[in-house]
Image (cartoon, rainbow, N blue to C red):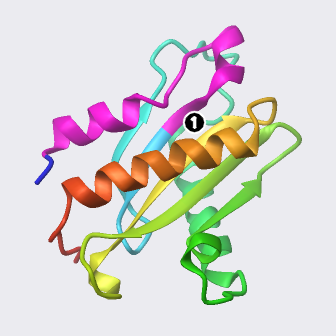
Protein backbone atom coordinates (compact mmCIF):
# COMPACT_ATOMS: atom_id res chain seq x y z
CA UNK A 1 0.00 0.00 0.00
CA UNK A 2 1.29 3.45 -0.89
CA UNK A 3 2.52 5.61 1.98
CA UNK A 4 1.90 9.34 2.36
CA UNK A 5 5.24 10.37 0.83
CA UNK A 6 4.68 8.08 -2.18
CA UNK A 7 1.16 9.45 -2.71
CA UNK A 8 2.51 13.01 -2.61
CA UNK A 9 5.14 12.01 -5.18
CA UNK A 10 2.45 10.57 -7.48
CA UNK A 11 0.31 13.72 -7.15
CA UNK A 12 3.29 16.00 -7.77
CA UNK A 13 3.84 14.46 -11.21
CA UNK A 14 0.96 16.55 -12.60
CA UNK A 15 1.59 19.77 -10.63
CA UNK A 16 3.39 22.59 -12.47
CA UNK A 17 4.64 25.94 -11.29
CA UNK A 18 4.02 29.57 -12.03
CA UNK A 19 4.20 31.72 -15.11
CA UNK A 20 4.17 29.93 -18.40
CA UNK A 21 4.17 26.53 -16.69
CA UNK A 22 0.89 27.41 -14.99
CA UNK A 23 -0.77 26.91 -18.38
CA UNK A 24 0.86 23.49 -18.90
CA UNK A 25 -0.86 21.62 -16.13
CA UNK A 26 -2.45 21.60 -12.73
CA UNK A 27 -1.14 23.90 -10.00
CA UNK A 28 -2.69 21.81 -7.21
CA UNK A 29 -3.64 18.14 -6.82
CA UNK A 30 -5.33 16.43 -3.87
CA UNK A 31 -6.42 13.02 -2.72
CA UNK A 32 -9.76 13.37 -0.93
CA UNK A 33 -11.66 11.04 1.38
CA UNK A 34 -15.11 9.74 0.49
CA UNK A 35 -16.50 12.73 2.41
CA UNK A 36 -14.44 15.20 0.37
CA UNK A 37 -11.88 15.93 3.08
CA UNK A 38 -8.29 16.42 1.87
CA UNK A 39 -5.99 13.55 2.80
CA UNK A 40 -2.93 14.76 0.87
CA UNK A 41 -2.51 17.93 -1.17
CA UNK A 42 0.38 18.99 -3.39
CA UNK A 43 0.50 22.60 -4.60
CA UNK A 44 3.15 24.22 -6.78
CA UNK A 45 5.65 25.74 -4.35
CA UNK A 46 6.81 28.54 -6.61
CA UNK A 47 3.50 30.31 -7.17
CA UNK A 48 3.96 33.97 -6.22
CA UNK A 49 1.28 35.39 -3.94
CA UNK A 50 -0.01 37.68 -6.67
CA UNK A 51 -0.36 34.74 -9.03
CA UNK A 52 -1.65 32.29 -6.45
CA UNK A 53 -5.25 32.33 -7.50
CA UNK A 54 -6.68 30.81 -4.37
CA UNK A 55 -5.53 30.31 -0.81
CA UNK A 56 -5.32 26.77 0.59
CA UNK A 57 -8.56 27.41 2.50
CA UNK A 58 -10.30 28.57 -0.67
CA UNK A 59 -9.07 25.47 -2.51
CA UNK A 60 -10.58 23.29 0.24
CA UNK A 61 -13.93 25.05 -0.21
CA UNK A 62 -13.67 24.66 -3.99
CA UNK A 63 -12.89 20.96 -3.47
CA UNK A 64 -16.12 20.54 -1.53
CA UNK A 65 -18.01 22.40 -4.28
CA UNK A 66 -16.52 20.06 -6.87
CA UNK A 67 -17.45 16.95 -4.85
CA UNK A 68 -20.97 18.33 -4.41
CA UNK A 69 -21.20 19.00 -8.16
CA UNK A 70 -20.01 15.44 -8.84
CA UNK A 71 -22.61 13.96 -6.49
CA UNK A 72 -25.44 16.03 -8.03
CA UNK A 73 -24.72 15.20 -11.67
CA UNK A 74 -27.05 12.73 -13.31
CA UNK A 75 -25.57 9.25 -13.61
CA UNK A 76 -26.02 7.13 -16.72
CA UNK A 77 -24.61 3.84 -15.42
CA UNK A 78 -21.34 4.03 -17.37
CA UNK A 79 -18.43 4.57 -14.96
CA UNK A 80 -16.26 6.09 -17.68
CA UNK A 81 -18.81 8.92 -17.84
CA UNK A 82 -20.19 8.92 -14.30
CA UNK A 83 -16.99 8.93 -12.22
CA UNK A 84 -15.72 12.43 -13.02
CA UNK A 85 -16.77 16.02 -13.55
CA UNK A 86 -15.24 19.38 -14.50
CA UNK A 87 -16.31 22.57 -12.80
CA UNK A 88 -15.52 26.10 -13.96
CA UNK A 89 -14.98 28.20 -10.83
CA UNK A 90 -14.48 31.53 -12.60
CA UNK A 91 -13.33 32.80 -16.01
CA UNK A 92 -9.99 30.99 -15.81
CA UNK A 93 -9.94 28.68 -12.79
CA UNK A 94 -11.15 25.13 -13.35
CA UNK A 95 -11.26 21.97 -11.28
CA UNK A 96 -11.66 18.34 -12.30
CA UNK A 97 -12.63 15.62 -9.84
CA UNK A 98 -12.58 11.87 -10.35
CA UNK A 99 -13.92 9.16 -8.07
CA UNK A 100 -12.15 5.82 -7.79
CA UNK A 101 -12.48 2.72 -5.65
CA UNK A 102 -9.80 1.03 -3.56
CA UNK A 103 -11.57 -2.31 -3.85
CA UNK A 104 -13.30 -4.44 -6.43
CA UNK A 105 -16.85 -3.83 -5.24
CA UNK A 106 -18.94 -0.68 -5.06
CA UNK A 107 -18.56 0.41 -1.42
CA UNK A 108 -18.74 4.00 -0.09
CA UNK A 109 -15.97 3.17 2.40
CA UNK A 110 -13.63 2.24 -0.46
CA UNK A 111 -14.35 5.42 -2.41
CA UNK A 112 -11.74 8.17 -2.79
CA UNK A 113 -11.43 11.21 -5.03
CA UNK A 114 -8.55 12.83 -6.84
CA UNK A 115 -8.91 16.49 -7.73
CA UNK A 116 -6.87 18.88 -9.89
CA UNK A 117 -6.99 22.67 -10.05
CA UNK A 118 -5.81 24.25 -13.29
CA UNK A 119 -6.14 27.33 -15.48
CA UNK A 120 -8.46 27.29 -18.48
CA UNK A 121 -5.67 27.53 -21.11
CA UNK A 122 -4.80 23.97 -20.01
CA UNK A 123 -7.34 21.85 -21.86
CA UNK A 124 -10.00 19.80 -20.12
CA UNK A 125 -8.93 16.80 -22.23
CA UNK A 126 -5.39 16.96 -20.85
CA UNK A 127 -6.74 17.47 -17.32
CA UNK A 128 -8.95 14.38 -17.79
CA UNK A 129 -5.96 12.35 -19.01
CA UNK A 130 -3.96 13.49 -15.96
CA UNK A 131 -6.72 12.68 -13.48
CA UNK A 132 -7.30 9.27 -15.14
CA UNK A 133 -3.61 8.40 -14.84
CA UNK A 134 -3.50 9.54 -11.21
CA UNK A 135 -6.62 7.62 -10.23
CA UNK A 136 -5.34 4.43 -11.91
CA UNK A 137 -2.02 4.57 -10.02
CA UNK A 138 -3.67 5.51 -6.72
CA UNK A 139 -6.42 2.87 -7.02
CA UNK A 140 -3.78 0.19 -7.52
CA UNK A 141 -1.48 1.52 -4.80
CA UNK A 142 -4.28 1.97 -2.26
CA UNK A 143 -6.06 -1.32 -2.96
CA UNK A 144 -7.79 -2.44 0.21
CA UNK A 145 -7.72 1.00 1.88
CA UNK A 146 -10.96 1.69 3.75
CA UNK A 147 -11.99 5.31 4.28
CA UNK A 148 -13.65 6.17 7.59
Residue drawn at point x = 19 percent, y = 65 percent: 143
Q: Quadrant of residue 146?
A: bottom left
Locate residue 37 relative to residue 66 in the image: left or right: left
Residue at (56, 64) in percent of width and height: 64
User: How crowded is the residue under tag 1: few (<14 C-alpha within 10 Å), some, or many (20+)?
Assistant: few
Asked whether 33 or 73 is in front, the reply is 73
Identity of the residue furthest to the right in this view? 91
Rendered position, 140 above or below 12? below
Q: Which residues are magenta?
A: 3-28
**Quadrant of the rendered image containing residue 79:** bottom right
Callout 1: SS: loop
Q: Quadrant of the C terminus?
A: bottom left
Place of residue 126 in the rendered image (x, y in percent of width and height, measured from the top left): 66, 39
Q: How many marks?
A: 1
Expressed as whole percent of the image width and height from the top left, the position of residue 102 reads 26, 70
Q: Label 1 belongs to which residue?
A: 55
**Image coordinates for residue 113, horizontal then vertical, percent:** 43, 63
Is residue 64 shown above or below 116?
below
Q: Residue at x 19, y 37 (%)?
A: 6
Quadrant that contains the N terminus: bottom left
In the figure, 76 relative to 30: above or below?
below
Q: Is 128 on the left or on the right of 140, as rendered?
A: right
Q: Going by the image, does 70 lie left or right of 12?
A: right
Amino acid sequence: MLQQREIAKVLSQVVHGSGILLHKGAFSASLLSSKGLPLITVTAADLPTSEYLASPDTLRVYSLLAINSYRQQEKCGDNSLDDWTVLSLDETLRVIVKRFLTGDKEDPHKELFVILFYMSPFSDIRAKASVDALSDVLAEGLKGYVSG
